[in-house]
Amino acid sequence: MAQLRLTDFFTRTKAASSVPVKRSRLKDPITGAPEPHTEQYGDGAVLPPSPHTPARGRTPALRGLAGRKRSRREMEAEPEHGGSCGRAVRKRLELHRDAEPMAQDLAPEPPASTNCSPSHGQDGATGRLQRVRAQLQSRLHRMKELPLGSIPAGTSTELRSRMERVRQLELRVRQRRAGSGATSGTDPVSSGTSSSPTPAYQRFHTLAEDVPPGLSLPYKYRVLAEMFRSVDTIAGMLFNRSETITFSKVKQGVQDMMRKQFEERHLGQIKTVYPTSYKLRQEKNIPSFGMKRSDYQLTLEPVLEEEEKVNGRLHLSASRLLQRRKEFNRNLMNIVKQHHKAFLAALSPPMVVPEEKLMRWHPRFNVDKVPDIIPAELPRPPQEDRLTTAQEVLNRAQGMLSPKMEKALANLALRTAEAGAGEPVVSKAPVPASTSSALKGVSQDLLERIRAKEAQKLHALMTRDAQQERRIGMLQRLPSMARILRNIFVAEKKQALTMDVACARMADSYEEQMAAGDMEKHLRLLAELLPHWVGIHTIRTDTYIKLDKGQDLRIITESLTKAAKEAETL
């Protein structure tokens, strides 16, 4: 049971001290027993009795031993008032039961003791737990009655604004989800465009390559090349064992190797890219599990040359598999180059880059947006002649039908022919590039010169080989290296330094991590471009580098920057 502070009673007593006090003896309305003294004032207000310390109760076993000194064990065994156990429990003030509601609001209730002997304190703890549970249930019920998204009254302005912001964000997310719609996952090889965002492992697949991403293939083309390699591996094993290569065997093997779905359209795409790789036929009387011998099955046969025989029969060797894989990748690259060529022709102004000089794609050419490869037509099992059009039915049943039926078939054939002849022809003429509204008022000659200059720069970028790329990178580093080299000579206070010492000092001071051999290449290139500023001399077995500290460093850096820009435009 909670307890009040003594100051609360003293405050009330002091506030009412000016009113005459009438002391009375009240009785309990339930039991009729007299209650403690209460104070009644002139205005009719009745205060609860003052708190008092209850008398210590004694057990029957110790009731006759009040005169002697008790031992520690007896004092610990004696229960205190209120259900507490042990001698360390503090005494509690006994309040009038009318003051209990106010006590519940003023002070939290202590937890009930669980390791004491049964007493009325446990019953009080159970009652307090029930009251707390009832309060929590009433609060939960009031919260559930509030409508979803509503802001309760009495909320602060800051909290109300934050809740409103959260509700607006939730509404925006729901609208965006509803606008995008649910999109089902498709095979990356068969679907070129999708409304769902492309996964990161497909968008940045070129970063995982060992070589620099120059002429990189689209992700779906790379998956198709991996499928061809798997098909060739399985077909080579079956062919060398003189087994019939069926599509069902190849399909299961490819799916086990790649963990991807392999369908007939993928085989048709392989046939489109590399037409001379396999001979495809429909054959029957092939023993296969789960199929009848009379059923037709699609079979594959690798196309090999006569000189590839081993012991009188054709053999698909590992070197031949490697050649076929390279040929397939080369054909894929040629397909992408054709799309890139069409993209360059559609630019304004159009660009023409020879394929043998092409080293990288145009910066605005999205490789992964290249259309899918159209699958080739695969052989189908032979079927009986089936009548599919009204004209075929009319020709086959000439003289066998009634005149009314013949007239109806003739009208249907006529309408079908007219519908096929009246289909509009879609024009595929390229749409001319339109000038942006932001460029209105700018002279056309200036725009043409800017576009021509940009096209020249992009042409140089696409035809630049790896050696030129490395040289341009070195030229771009030279201006900052020139400043560092001059500071090293000023700090050393020498006219010449050995190449090893200069390279070590430069490697320690440069912002990028670079080996001593690479730093020496940069210094030799610096001496090649500015021989009047940097000189390299070989004396006996040592190489020395000499620097003219009297020249203006600003002129030196400007000449180096100009040389780098000229190399980029070549």
Image: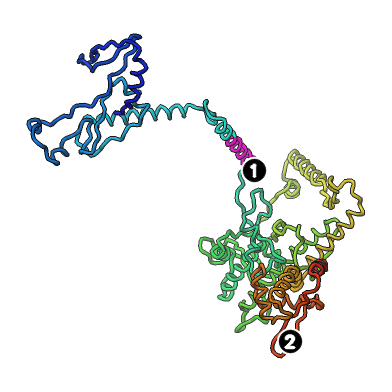
Residue 542: give x, y in percent of width and height: 69, 87
Circle 2: element type: strand
Which disc, if any, is residue 538?
2
Q: Using residue 290 as the reference point, say whether residue 433 is left or right of it.
A: right
Rendered residue at 75%/80% (across/down): 546
Q: Residue furthest left?
A: 64
Circle 1: element type: helix
Q: Which residue is mark 1?
A: 180
Q: Say which amino acid is labelled 1.
A: Ser
Q: How many marks?
A: 2
Q: Is residue 178 magenta?
A: yes
From what the image shows, is residue 6 above or below residue 514?
Answer: above
Q: Is residue 204 at all visible to an observer of this figure?
A: yes
Residue 554: give x, y in percent of width and height: 80, 67
- Front residue of 89 and 232: 89
Q: Residue furthest front?
A: 18
Residue 171: give x, y in percent of width and height: 60, 36
Classify 10 Å Cα crowding around label 2: few (below 14), some (14-19), many (20 and above). few
Q: Say which amino acid is labelled 2.
A: Thr
Question: Do labels 1 and 2 touch, CB within 8 Å?
Answer: no
- Front residue of 126 and 336: 126
Question: In the rendered image, which quarter is residue 90 located in?
Answer: top left
The numbered mark, 1 or 2, whose residue comes first in the sequence reads 1
Which segment is the magenta one? Answer: 165-180
From what the image shows, is residue 411 above or below residue 213?
Answer: above
Residue 246: give x, y in percent of width and height: 58, 66
Which disc, if any, is residue 68?
none
